[in-house]
Amino acid sequence: MQVINRLRQLDAFPKINEDFYSRTLSGGVITLVSSIVMVLLFFSEFSLFLNPVTESELIVDTSRGETLQINFDVTFPALACSILSLDAMDISGEQHLDVIENPLQRHGGRLEHNETYCGSCFGAESSDDDCCNSCEEVREAYRKKGWALTNPDLIDQCKREGFLQKIKEEEGEGCNLYGSLEVNKVAGNFHFAPGKSFQHSNMHVHDLLAFQKETFNVSHKIHKLSFGAHFPGVVNPLDGVEQGQQTSTGMYQYFLKVVPTVYTDIRGHKILSNQFSVTEHFKAAEIGLTRSLPGVFFFYDLSPIKVQFTEQRTPFLHFLTNVCAIVGGVFTVSGIIDSFVYHGHRAIKKKIEIGKLS
């Protein structure tokens, strides 16, 4: 009995006889409101418990020897596919020139290579056995030699195929280029520009003279541009960007800062990807100046910091602690409000009864 009495004295929740309870209208309203608030907060916390949260962490990128995947989908409404070329190069010296091969035009026709004889390359042969059976092959041979094709009408293949006439017929056609590039994970650039590209005196040059045109409208729309695989929550700032050229010829430059990113989902599956920020610049270009070539240029650099995103579930004990905090907090606050309202009402009522408050 002494043990029971001692335990009874430790009771932190003494009970009051129901005869001493005083129920009020204000207390009922406060109880109803606090119950609704408690239920809403509980379901909010339960929803957070069911859905995984994403934690972020910044670390130094120590990876080496990796490659970078560049995904693009760009439309040029005023340039035909036969005029455009795509080049990629990086600071290590590696170059990928004229990446696009046999592009499809808007009407769906493929650039033809139907010649069957061994035509001359007009001095651009690498060996005596080399043949240039089409205008495109002559242009490619000139590109490898680092020569410009100034007048296609002097080349038999180009004249027979009507190269310049095709260029005129394609006036007004557009071109949609999409795909991906695999490049070294170092700073570099890739660009879309008219004309065949080649190296001349250690400079990157595009042969624009072959088209015998004074202006090139490089208006474009970037449907998609990303580095690496897609992951939840990624935002590519250039997606949907559209640029309309107002001058006769221009050069669009996009300067990108690429941030390596690792996303780990709730099952532990890792997605190696990248995010990037961008600034842009436009300047009017002049034909003949290699430093102001008309086109769309993307210059990218790598950040030394890597971002890691990890999906995690809220621990059950953490959820239980939050629920207890919600119940206890709402109960305590509602009790304080009820006490304030009750005692305030009694004080005002007493003053009215003694005539001190009219």
Image (cartoon, rainbow, N blue to C red):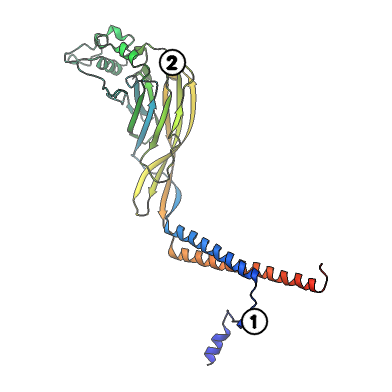
* 211 up-or-down from 181: above or below: above
Crowdedness near tag 2: few (<14), some (14–19) or many (≥20) residues, C-alpha within 10 Å: few
Q: Report the disc number at residue 68.
A: none
At which x and y percent is residue 301?
43, 34
Looking at the image, is mark 1 or mark 2 earlier in the sequence? 1
At which x and y percent is residue 250?
46, 20
Label 2 secondary element: loop
Which residue is most to the bottom? 1
Question: Residue 85 or 161: which is nearer the viewer?
Answer: 161
Give the residue type that dot 1 points to.
Phe
Residue carrying label 1: 20
Question: Residue 18 or 265: which is nearer the viewer?
Answer: 18
Residue carrying label 2: 289
* 324 up-or-down from 282: above or below: below
At which x and y percent is residue 5?
55, 89
Tell us which disc is closer to us: 1 or 2. 1
At which x and y percent is residue 93?
35, 28
Which residue is most to the top? 154
* 349 up-or-down from 183: above or below: below
Q: CA distance from mark 1 to mark 2?
A: 97 Å
The answer to whether residue 329 of the structure is visible from this angle is no
The answer to whether residue 279 of the structure is visible from this angle is yes
The residue at 47%/63% (across/down) is: 319
Quadrant of res 207: top left
Give the residue type that dot 2 points to.
Leu
